[in-house]
Image (cartoon, grey):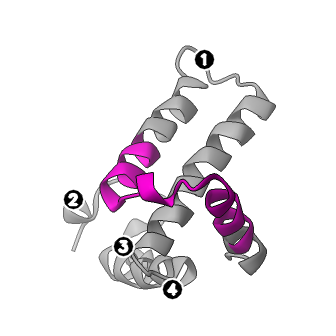
Amino acid sequence: MSDSRVREALREFVAERDWDQFHSPENLAKSVVIEAAELLECFQWSSEHEGDRVRDELADVLTYCHLLATKLDLDVDQIVLDKLDKTRSKYPVETARGSSEKYDRLPD
């Protein structure tokens, strides 16, 4: 899923600007939420959206997620796969297929 080119490009970009000093886990987590809100704003009044703007905002969200994972020494691919395993057990195909119910409201 993740690409080493992305990690390296982000590392270089941040290093060239000496921005790592501002990238505490707390600040990066705040930035993820702020950028996610800007992404949501693309859909605020309509399901119609500007493709380029959505791409840019999604890229911002992903950028801060990558930076946060790097700061916390987490492998982006592995944490996604680990969470998928947990979620798979909460949402078995037999009871979750075609349903948007939260796991604790699915039939047993």
**Residue 82 located within the stretch drawn in magenta:** no
Q: Residue 31's quadrant in the figure? A: top left
Q: Residues within 10 Å of mark 4 (few under 14, many from 20)?
A: few
Mark 3, residue position: 91
The reply, left or right, for residue 42 in relation to residue 90 is right
Residue for point 64% across, 52% down:
17
Mark 2, residue position: 105
| Label 1 residue SS | loop
Mark 4, residue position: 78
Q: Earlier in the sequence, mark 1 or mark 2?
A: 1
Q: Position of residue 101 (x, y in %)?
A: 32, 54
Q: Earlier in the sequence, mark 1 or mark 4?
A: 1
Q: Earlier in the sequence, mark 3 or mark 1?
A: 1
* Residue numbers of the magenta segment: 8-33
Q: Residues within 10 Å of mark 2 (few under 14, many from 20)?
A: few
Mark 1, residue position: 46
Q: Which kind of residue does numbered mark 3 sit on? A: Tyr
| Label 4 residue SS | helix
